[in-house]
Amino acid sequence: MLLGNNERRMLRAMLTDPPRKWTLEDLLAETGWTDQVHVAGAGKALQERELVDVEESRSRLVSLGAEGAKAADEGLLESRLWKWISDQDDSERSMKTLLAAGFERSETGPGIGLLKGLGVSFEAGSFVVEDDGTVMQAIDKRSRFIQSLAVGAKESSSLDDALVEHFASRVGLIEFDDTVSRNWSLTEGGASIDDSELDDVDMIGELTPEILQTEAWKGADFKPFDVNAPSPTPIGGRTHPMQALITRIRSVFLEMGFSEIEGDFVQSAGWNMDALYIPQSHPARTMQDTFYLSQPERIEVEDEYLGLWAKVHEHGHDTGSRGWGGAFDKEEAQRALLRTHTTVNTIRYIAENPHVPSRVFGIGRVFRQETIDRTHMPEFHQIEGIIHEPEASLPMLISTLKTFYAKMGYPDVRVRPAYFPYTEPSAEVDILWREEWMELGGSGIFRPEVTEPLGTEWPVCAWGMGLERLAMLILDLDDIRQLYQPDLERLRRMPIL
Ligand code: PHE
């Protein structure tokens, strides 16, 4: 019987106490190994030879999630609502007073749902309670469950199944951690092996050119090779998933015959907005939404364009439009800002190449004053593109976007009518993801108010899509911040694109 040295070492260790059931820690201590992979690997080989039995036990630890920890501190939503209801007179139990009492709007919907499940109904604008006792009991049970986990994680078999199931269906309250632990013990065959047969042997584990050059390999023992044996995962460098996604998008557009363009982060309001016929009074232009700069504070824009935009904005010039009216402020158009969309790149490209048919795309960073949360960041990326040629049309736009997303792995694309100040018609683009329509961006045909000052008479198909949204779908993330946190463990586990 040809056993490898690891198997011999593990058997020697186990034969020091043949009837014993060994845990991983015991075996590591007795063999002197530091990596559990050796125990797993040798254990598996010995199991296959029926010298060792391996027993697996699975356990599931339940702990509080972020919402659960909050509930442990502040009380469960149903418990806070119930307290409020109990404190009110009948006539005061209405939605209006509820909001006034400091409950968030986002809490009232789910809160009412929870209470309903407990037998509290909401009729004609106020709460009706059938049986105080059962409601209180149920809430109390739930609260005690959460409190018990606040002390520390618990084995799920020690918890009430119904409550575990209930909280598992609510977002963020509890989390599960599944682990498998193993025990190794000698079989009869294993226990009857004689220790003295288990000395380490000289075996060739790797055939090197040096060994092959001599005759040494001829009489040698070879280490059996098992491609299914557990082994440590080598950790090498890899491209950041976001960068890998950008590379893939780039190659899809290049494959479709588009050329790539770039532009600066710092732009004038004129090119970022006025050129796009966004009215100077538009809410998105305020400091709350746009990062204006103090250095430089101003970026000069060619008089020719300022003059044309002024005419178009004030009365439509000769575009057939009536314009927005009012007086166009040329100083406002020269305020410096961080670009709020990459549409500024495609617009400038048309202005520089008004008579050249073109299909160009760009993938770039944009900036908006967003509060950071699960789906928003003040810096994100857009995938922008245009088709600028005499025959450009809406069907061409739609089929281009469909082709793009199909190549990215999302064959179901839907467009819905939308509004942007710079396109007519305008369309919102959704893709089907796990049976749900997800909005990924905007598109349309640039209005004459946009294209004529740039010096072209051809229609332009244009689109701007969110990159992070797409990344979240492809990488299966529920929080956009996960893309940018330097959590190497998590990044390593993300799929290779
Ligand atoms: N710029 C728009 C946005 O940032 C997207 C868009 C681009 C819409 C081009 C229409 C045409 O959401």
Image: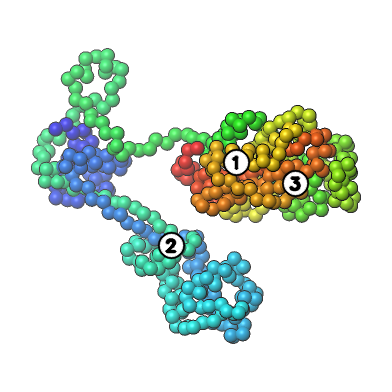
Q: Which residue is mark 3?
A: 424
How far, Cα to Cα, is label 3 from label 1? 19 Å
Q: Which mark is residue 173?
A: none
- Left or right of 109, for residue 224: left
- Residue 410, quarter of picture: top right
At 73% from the left and 38% from the top, the residue drawn is: 460
- Quarter of the figure with the N terminus: top left
Other residues around mark 2 within 10 Å, as few (<14) / some (14–19) / many (≥20): some
In the picture, measured across the screen, residue 439 lies left or right of residue 138, that is right
Which percent across, then down, holds residue 297?
80, 43
Q: Residue 137: x and y, percent?
A: 43, 78
Mark 2 or mark 1, earlier in chain: 2
Q: Mark 2 — residue?
A: 168
Q: Secondary structure at mark 2?
A: helix
On screen, residue 456 above or below 88 = above
Residue placed under numbered mark 1 in the picture: 402
| Circle 3: residue type | Glu
